Image (tube, rainbow, N blue to C red):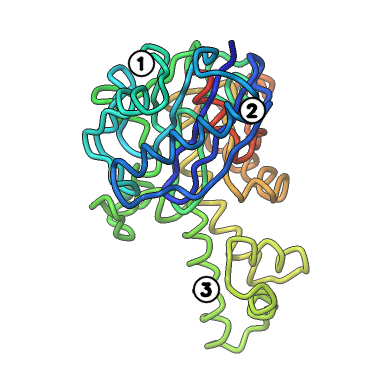
Amino acid sequence: MFNLGIDLGGTNTAAGIISASGEVLYKYKEKTDTRSEESVIGSLAAAVRSLLNEAGADASEIGTLGVACPGTVDGERGIVEYSANLPLLGTNVARMLSEAVGVDISRIKTANDADAAALGEYRAGAGAGARDFLMITIGTGIGGGYISDGKILTGKNRAGGEFGHTVIVYDGEACGCGRRGCAERYCSAKALERMTKAKIAECEASGKKTVMPELAAAEGKVSARTAFRAADAGDGAAKEVLDSYIAYLSCALTNYINIFQPEVLAIGGGICNEGERLLAPLRERVYAEMYNKRQSPERYTRICCAELGGGAGAIGAAML
Ligand SMILES: [Zn+2]
């Protein structure tokens, strides 16, 4: 028996056969066919068939078949209630996938993708050994998952854990969710890009020197990396961008720590490539702001980067 996890994304379907300790034994990645509900289930089935074929195994040998999906997922019934990036609305993913690949429905588990990624990190990555674990994923948006004692906490309607849509600037920037000033508008990779572009425009208008336009041109565009690379080169304007980005991010993370007091808070997403450049100033600010700052530092929440990279969702799904 083995477990198979699928991370169903709006762009790619990533999957793997995962050992009990979270090791990826076989890997799969293809574009998701997002034309219809049936085609999305087809993408899931293709991942299962391809992995079984590669492993020379049979569907009856699958212990758990886990599917991580963006959106509101009813894990008890195997239904994706709503997904912004996929044509799934009240879709019984567990039943449709069971019929497509011949795996008993009792073995098919579903969860929100951020929750699955958090579970993967909790079991086999940055959160291994912790009781209370919080993972925040920084990408186009801000995702998050909180796990306590092995349980993913999602609240009523499984709609909790929307860390990106908590307000850090009252009446601030308009967010896609309808509120203003959400953490997502200031702490996502997209927000860092926006701040970088604004600083470049400000420098152009005032005649202040910066290497950011040069670096962006060499890369083809302004990205979340631009300010980090420019700051490495001693660029003052880039340091201002990062100071302000890290101030917003530390505000959001301090809020989360004050509410949950996790043992470990792991940050996931491409921004983790910056490692200590991101973490060191972030820790400094969070540890100075958080409510329990007067406790001895060994009792502080450990702030670190996620360890499983893009594979966390599939690994967590296999462990549902
Ligand atoms: Zn929002």
Residue 51 horizontal/vertical position (percent): 58, 30
Q: In screen coordinates, is 74 left or right of 252?
A: left
Would you identify the image quadrant in which residue 214 lies? bottom right
Which amino acid does the dot numbered 2 rest on? Arg
| Residue 256: percent from left, percent from top | 45, 33
**Amino acid type, mark 1:** Ile
The front one of 140 and 27 is 27
**Disc number placed over residue 105 in the picture, else none:** 1
- The residue shown at (50%, 11%) is 149
- Mark 2 crowdedness (10 Å alpha carbons): few <14, some 14-19, many ≥20: some
**Circle 1: is it few (<14), some (14-19), or many (20+) Cα within 10 Å?**
some
Q: In the picture shown, does residue 50 fall above or below 274?
A: above
Rounded to the nearest whole Å, what is the CA distance between mark 2 and mark 3? 32 Å
Q: Helix or strand or loop: what does disc 1 sit on? A: helix
Give yes or no for contact between labels 3 and 1 (Cβ–Cβ under 8 Å): no
Percent of width and height locating residue 84: 30, 47
Q: Which quarter of the rendering shows the N terminus?
A: top right
User: Which residue corresponds to mark 2?
Assistant: 302
User: Could you tell me how far apart the alpha carbons at marks 1 and 2 are, in whole angstroms?
Assistant: 38 Å
Disc 3: which residue: 197
Quick check: can you spot residue 255?
no
Q: Is residue 192 above or below residue 270?
A: below
In the picture, measured across the screen, residue 278 lies left or right of residue 158, that is right
Q: CA distance from mark 3 to mark 1?
A: 49 Å
Q: Residue drawn 34% across and 21% down? A: 75
Which numbered disc, 2 or 3, marks the residue closer to the eye?
3
Along the polypeptide, which appears first: circle 1 or circle 2?
1
x then y, percent, for residue 96: 31, 28
Of the two numbered discs 3 and 1 in the rendering, the one whose residue sits closer to the viewer: 1
The amino acid type found where label 3 is placed reads Lys
